[in-house]
């Protein structure tokens, strides 16, 4: 009886000599190989990232630039007796030729595609009459403008087809390049992609003192100078 128990309790019975050591060596070898693979992959990825970020990418003389950059015109405005500057915007459908001879259905403000650039100065009172000539409701949001929520033009302020919305506020922020666009719930991207978008430029005393250089690269700057001079003379029409 005791002999049987001693045989069954004999340690290592049925296990080849040196097996645990060989298993440990294999595990260590796999760990080392795995570490080497990871280090190699990181090194290769870093090399490609370094080559990519350090590469000089230039399309000068190789990529055709056939379409001239279109600069949106300045929107016309009127000034009421109390000094309020009033703009008129109308959302409408139309057609635009992005490629000669190929018309595309588009939307725009005061035209077939995009909208004119609105411009005002810090401290001015502004009113915008926004009419909707589309077949569906939309809205106009003043992106980046500091103004009351009820004038913001979010999804809660939709303009029905044929209706007009007239927000008004006082410009009270530094000079900035802002933009306006629709903001209907769940359909903002679609309405903007169709062409409903435009710039809203704000001026202040500091921006009025910026130097205006000559040349085609300073079109907007020169336009700003002309606008400031025209306003000083009481002009309120669309810039030429």
Image (spheres, helix red, strand yellow):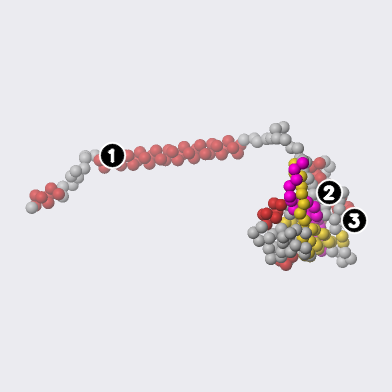
- C-alpha separation, residue under disc 1 versus residue under disc 3: 93 Å
Residue 88 vs residue 51, the one in the foreground:
88
Query: Circle 3 sits on which residue?
Result: 235
Q: Position of residue 193 (x, y in %)?
A: 69, 51
Comparing labels 1 and 2, the label whose residue is closer to the camera: 2
- Seen from the viewer's position, the closer of residues 54 and 157 is 157
Given contact means CB atoms under 8 Å apart, are the residues at marks 1 and 3 in contact?
Answer: no
Q: Is residue 105 magenta?
A: yes
Residue on which disc 2 sits: 223
In magenta, the rendered stretch is 101-125
Asked whether residue 70 is in view, the answer is yes
Quarter of the view holding residue 56? top right
Q: Secondary structure at mark 3?
A: loop
**Can the viewer see residue 145?**
no
Task: Specify which label sits upstream in the sequence, 1 or 3.
Answer: 1
Establish if 68 lies above or below 123. above
Instruction: State which tag comes first along the sequence, 2 or 3.
Output: 2
In space, the residues marked 1 and 2 are separated at their CA atoms by 82 Å
Q: Of helix, strand and loop, which one carries label 2?
A: helix
Residue named by callout 1: 22
Q: Earlier in the sequence, mark 1 or mark 2?
A: 1
Instruction: Name the residue rendered at 77%, 56% in the picture.
Output: 92
């Amino acid at each position: 009886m005791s002999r049987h128990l001693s045989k069954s309790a004999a340690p290592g019975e049925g296990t080849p000599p040196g097996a645990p050591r060989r298993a440990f060596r294999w595990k260590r070898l796999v760990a080392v190989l795995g570490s080497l693979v990871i280090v190699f992959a990181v090194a290769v990825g870093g090399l490609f990232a370094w080559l990519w970020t350090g590469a000089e990418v230039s399309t000068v003389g190789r990529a055709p630039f056939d379409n001239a950059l279109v600069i949106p015109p300045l929107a016309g405005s009127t000034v009421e007796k109390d000094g309020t500057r009033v703009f008129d915007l109308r959302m409408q459908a139309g057609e635009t030729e992005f490629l000669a001879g190929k018309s595309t259905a588009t939307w725009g403000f005061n035209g077939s595609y995009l909208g004119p650039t609105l411009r005002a100065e810090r401290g001015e009172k502004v009113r915008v009459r926004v009419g909707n000539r589309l077949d569906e409701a939309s809205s106009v949001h003043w992106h980046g403008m500091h103004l009351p929520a009820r004038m913001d033009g979010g999804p809660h302020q939709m303009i029905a087809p044929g209706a007009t919305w007239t927000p008004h506020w006082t410009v009270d922020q530094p000079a900035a390049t802002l933009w306006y666009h629709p903001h209907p719930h769940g359909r903002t991207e679609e309405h903007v992609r169709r062409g409903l978008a435009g710039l809203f430029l704000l001026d202040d005393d500091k921006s009025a003192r910026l130097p205006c250089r000559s040349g085609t690269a300073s079109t907007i700057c020169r336009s700003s100078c002309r606008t400031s001079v025209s306003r000083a003379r009481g002009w309120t029409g669309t810039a030429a």
